[in-house]
Image (spheres, helix red, strand yellow):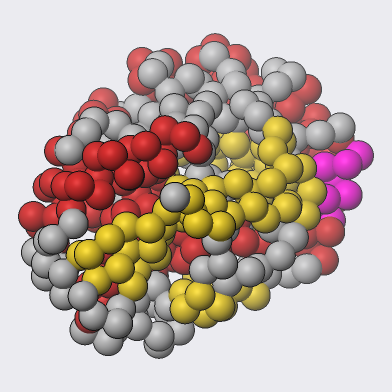
Amino acid sequence: MIIKDIELGVINIPLARPFKTALRTVEYVEDVVIKVTTDTEFSGYGEAPPTAVITGETKGSIITAIRDFIKPALVGMDIDNLDGIFHKLHSCMVKNTSAKAAVDMAIYDLYAKKYQTPLYKVLGGNKTELETDLTISVNPIPEMVADSLDAVGKGYKILKIKVGKEGLKDVERIAAIREAVGPDINIRVDANQGWNAKQSVQIITAMEDRGLNIELVEQPVPAHDLKGMKFVTGHVNTPILADESVFSPEDAISIIREGAADLINIKLMKTGGIYNALKICSIAEIYGVECMIGCMLESKLSVSAAAHLAAAKSVITRADLDGPSLCKADPFVGGPIYDENMIRMVNEPGIGIESVPFLVID
């Protein structure tokens, strides 16, 4: 099975409600999608969200990276030569991790299709279903409480609460949500780099003192401040999850060895795809560190690739794969089944997506 072409396109899917974090506000999923064609009847699909505030990539940069650097490097290669393909993918240019991730997942999609096997079984086949949280955007407290209750009413048992804009006022946000949803709902707190180290300890300690029972706090400090994150991790009881600080396997090793965080968040758009995400899984297993699988603002296409990885690996013990649930519509055919908080794998070959309606870019 030889790679013949990589076609580029875009999708535009409105969100059910604006997505607000400490870093940005978004109303649409506007992502680059690709179709890798071969000399057989099989094609593979991938997706890349332009997330400039995290990966530094824009729609234009993703298109240029794939069209001018990645495609020329990979056309003509045999799908069975995975190691060679991914060596070329990651050596043809530095960074541009979302662009690489889109192509990476399309290659894995094709590889599993060639052998007529669901991707999660090719990667490890650990489980057939996942439970995801649902993100609650940062808003005035009454709106966040209402959104949390709505999520619980739909069956979600885990909420990820966005904070990081107003310091200690974030404690009041979490307290109001905890009072509203009761003690049995898991609450994860995501500051999106919104606090400094001393603030983080003050805020997290205040949540602990009030008995708010937080499962974890995600990326409390800026991504580059590993010393600050280590300070936070060492001064609070609540587990700290490293997100924006972890792009590469090397990052994961540094954070684990330094004791800068308790948990690692894997996102394909940061790692450059499944190939490097598998390396992070192996590193985490060696050190006995659990991982979460997460996503950016992505549609069902790329979130499904992440779901296959999560279903394959036991070291991935938590899922934050709510991208499809945040979208107002699902334009795709096939793939895992998203039933509110549960994601169920199917036995279709590859990622399972059969149709991707995108606007082709010349």
Q: Is residue 346 above or below residue 84?
A: below
Q: Is residue 310 above or below residue 147?
A: below
* Residue 219 percent across, percent down from the top left: 50, 31
Outermost residue, right direction? 142
Q: Indicate yes or no whether the magenta region holds residue 266.
A: no
- Residue appearing at x 50%, y 21% in the figure: 221
> Does residue 114 appear left or right of residue 199 in this picture?
left
Q: Is residue 287 above or below residue 320?
A: above
Q: In the depicted view, which residue is nearer to us: 180 or 115? A: 115
* Residue 307, picture quadrant: bottom left
> Does residue 354 appear left or right of residue 199 in this picture?
left
* Residue 213 percent across, percent down from the top left: 65, 44
Q: In the depicted view, which residue is nearer to us: 219 or 236? A: 219
Outermost residue, front direction? 362
* Residue 236 percent across, percent down from the top left: 51, 28
Q: Is residue 164 above or below residue 68?
A: above
* Residue 279 percent across, percent down from the top left: 20, 50
> Does residue 13 appear left or right of residue 217 in this picture?
right
- Residue appearing at x 16%, y 75% in the figure: 1
What segment is highlighted magenta in the picture?
142-149
* Residue 321, picture quadrant: bottom right
Q: In the depicted view, which residue is nearer to us: 167 or 327? A: 327
What is the magenta segment's predominant secondary structure? helix
Number of numbered discs? 0
- Residue appearing at x 38%, y 77% in the figure: 127
- Residue appearing at x 74%, y 19% in the figure: 166
